[in-house]
Image (cartoon, rainbow, N blue to C red):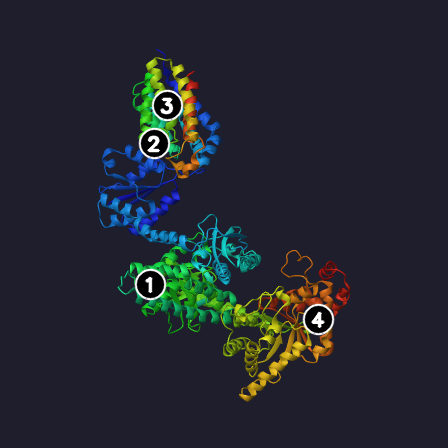
Amino acid sequence: MVSIVIVSHSEKLAEGVKELAEQMSQNKVKIAAAGGLDDESSPIGTDAFKIMEAIELVDSEDGILVLMDIGSAVMNAELATEMLPEEIMKRVLLCEAPLVEGAIAAAAQSMVGANLQAVAKEARNGIEGKASLLCTAENEEVESLDETIVTDGKEINITVPNHLGLHARPAVRLVEITNKFNNKVSVSVNNKPFVSATSISQVGTLGAKQGDTLIFKVVGDEFLQFEKALKQFELDNFGDSKEVVVKKEERKKPLKISATNNDFIEGIPASKGISIGKAKVFLNASISVDKTIVDHSLEEINKFKKAVKRIVLETEEIQHKTMNLYGSENAEIFGFHLLLLNDKEKLSEVENLITENHFSAAYAWFRVFSDLEDKYKGMSDQYLRERASDIVEIRNKVIDEISGSQQMKITLTEPSILVVNDIGPAQTLSLDTDKVLGIISKTGGETSHATILARSLGIPSITGLENKIDIIKDGDVIGIDGSTGIIYLEKIHPKKIEELREKQQIEEKLFQESFSKAKLPAVSSDGVEFQILANISSPKEAQIAFTNGADGIGLYRTEFLYMNRETPPSEEEQYEIYKQVCNNMQGLPITIRTLDVGGDKPIPYLGIPEETNPFLGLRGIRYCLKNTGIFKAQLRALCRISADYDISVMFPMVGMLEEVIEAKALLKEVREELDAEKIAYAKDMRIGIMVEVPSVIFILPQLAKHLDFLSIGTNDLTQYLLAMDRESTLLSKHYSALHPAVLNALSKIIVGANAQGIDVSLCGELASNPKATALLSAIGLRKYSMSGPVIPRIKDAIRTMDVASNREILKDIVLSSTLNEVEQSINA
Amino acid sequence: METIKLSQLITWLEKTAKYMQENKEYLTELDSAIGDADHGFNMERGFNKVIGKIEELKQSEDAAALLKGTGMTLISSIGGASGPLYGTFFLQASMVLKGNKELTLEDLKASFENGLKGVKSRGRASLGEKTMIDVLEPVVTSLVTSTEKGLTINEALENTVNVAETGMKSTINMLATKGRASYLGERSVGHQDPGATSSYLILKALKESIN
């Protein structure tokens, strides 16, 4: 067999290429690496003697093929050859083939016993596969440059503000923003060629990092509007949280040591939890479509368009379901899928391949999306690389749809741990949660969309296992620990499985203990009982709130049900979701806030006109009273759910009594309609309002006569009371719910509500501050609503405090003159 | 007839090593403009290795052994493209000096001629490509002329340093078509070639060692 010598300036590169080639030839071909210098301080370079030794090491009568990188590698390889004894020199061939491609191709060819010349020829051709793949893409780009890419026009520059850069979610938003306006827009970063800003495949692969400047070229009538929207998007930190995400780096890197048969298997811990159960192996070969040439292109185009349309509908449905059940962050995953499915550039690429190359619909689609998959896989940013599995999922779903097969469907007949090559987010969601005990996969990462969903669904999961997974056979009993990334096979490690089972029981016990503690009421040391409620947006968050010991839901924000879609949710859809929330809270009281739209929460189909001052415009109840169709559908769903569960309804943005009276009249209409239809509802459903408009403070007694409760939203109340934009960084020094003006307002509301005998609670951010809890307890507040995970901490804080002494300590605080004074008193 | 002694060749190597050390930053700076910023490093390392073997080299029985030993050391220690290039220069230069305990100008000319031939075939470069050839080739031409004119060794070496300097500076306005610098295309114009510069330093060291 022909031997191979790899010469590189870098020892690591030479060893790496050797490793790749050895894997290709299954270690049958002798391969030697001659990389780098034996100089620790400066190891990059080539050494003729090292090359000579490598050639001698693998010397073979069939010949030695030497592949090298550039510059001195070539010269030193020549020099090395000249220094060899003549009989060896005769059988050395220095080959100009590309190093990586050449080595792999040569190894494969040598393995089958080809002679030196044939192996060299194959090495030289190693580049062809890649060339043919990439040439098409290049041509495409040139074409699109001519037609659609704007290279002149007005320029807008924005700096990527968020920590993760222009990853999938902001890329989706960016394309959405661009699509909203009637402009032709292209975008570029770091001197890359301009691409269409309406193409998610192109925007998503720009790879813009934090601090990079995105340059937009805009031609069109709506330049100013677009510019404004872009600047807002930049200010909003591209929709990401402003906290610097360090979690990713802090996380322990999985060991790269591959497991042998005697050892456990280790992968990337993706979603925590322990599971023990039968493995269900779905390691079907990755979906591939053979090149097929067809005569009737038109028919294929129809097939392709129909399939895409079907998958778009299906994905929209999944998106709504996800939004409702698991919240907007999870739902945005499918926003990315939808943009890909509607990506004009990609769709026309597929169409061209069908009409011009006469490819079948399935092959054309497969080819375009496989190229895109490769593009994502080649991204330097890990987050973007992990989007490849989204591309694969979409690609395969459409192919399934075109061919009528069901390769993407995963059906479990009994509770099992799923063993897969790769899993997409939609596939993850489609799993029967009663049957799937865990998911372990070959490819994927911490930020894969499937991983994110597995965490939301609470399915233990380990990923990035690669070939290590192959040892697991269908039906094997395995134990997985999603927090460590370790997998044991029962047949190999029965003891370890036992240990894992014990660990599982201990964890379950610990959880039960902390859960029962969390569930205990929050009673201060002097015996005052508090109610600690949760703010939620989805059934998933309700579940989290419940496990954290929430005494109920103080604020269920329903506007998320209305976002990211084309039409409002139907009464039925709402009813189902509300029911899920109620079930997840197991009968505890729930306060549902009616649609709070406007201001910073635009929903295009609701038709709210462009306002110069949206925060003072058609917001919350004001919108609902003008759009009674949408409002009444929600009220009907709320009334119906109130028949079986403890529900309160709450109107947002109320500033005057007229609004309450009008809303209640609509509620009465709804009830009468339900009566007529003989549909049950609770006649005593409590009715309340959010207190966020300062005018409420001055008409408390009048309002109280018509209401059962008040819930204070400190964020907006502070903003409106101080007339300070809460987003403004210039004003943030004085924007605080602890400002004496706000504290006095809070005091008036709490004291007033107590005097009027109606319930009062607080659901703004202030509620999650333990110091504020103490302060407000002194004023007389007994009900607080906050994000679920904060609840145990606040309950603990309450258990250690003494309301009577709080009252003593803090009695003068409302008399403070400045924010500084307040802060000093509560920190004292 | 005046000749170059083996001990003078040793001085040449030592002086060269000193120059490489002194000009390490300068060469690296030149290389960072158009190459991979390792030339200064590499040359210093190469000639330091030669100095490490200087006692051994002093024992050489003839000029051939001395220059061959130098070439082999440079090959295994420089690391970049200059390794095989300078290595080849000294190896090829050594070939014509079998049995020489001292060198006449004629010998020096012949050995440099052979060395240049080796470098040109190794690097496949010719005059005007912004490489060390732009120094070495004029140097060899000048040695040929000096030999024909019957100049003294000192006069001849004086001339080589002059043409070496002109050659080195001529690379500033050249477009690189060989080596790393060629990746820069037009952007390589305006920078002096680091390889030409190190060649000049070697010639300068030679002149000063014989004087």
Front residue of this view, candidates A756 and A671: A671
Question: Which amino acid does the dot numbered 1 rest on?
Answer: Ile
Read off the residue under disc 4.
A695
What residue lies at 59% left-to-right and 84% top-to-bottom? A669
**Circle 2/circle 3 CB separation < 8 Å:** no
Read off the residue under disc 1.
A287
Residue A688 appears in which quarter of the rendering?
bottom right
Q: Which mark is residue A272?
A: none
Residue A470 can be seen in this image: no
Q: Does A591 sit above or below residue B133?
A: below
Mark 4–mark 3 distance (CA, rounded to whole Å): 94 Å
Q: Residue furthest front?
A: A221
10 Å crowding of disc 1: few (<14), some (14-19), many (20+): few
Q: Does A569 sit above or below residue A33?
A: below
Front residue of this view, candidates B53 and A192: A192
Question: Which amino acid does the dot numbered 4 rest on?
Answer: Ser
Mark 2–mark 3 distance (CA, rounded to whole Å): 14 Å
| Residue A159 appears left or right of A430 | right
> Which chain is home to disc 1?
A
Question: Which amino acid does the dot numbered 3 rest on?
Answer: Pro
> Which chain is home to disc 4?
A
| Residue A489 appears left or right of A82 | right
Q: Quadrant of the C terminus of chain A?
A: bottom right
Residue A364 can be seen in this image: yes
Share a chain, discs 4 and 2?
Answer: no
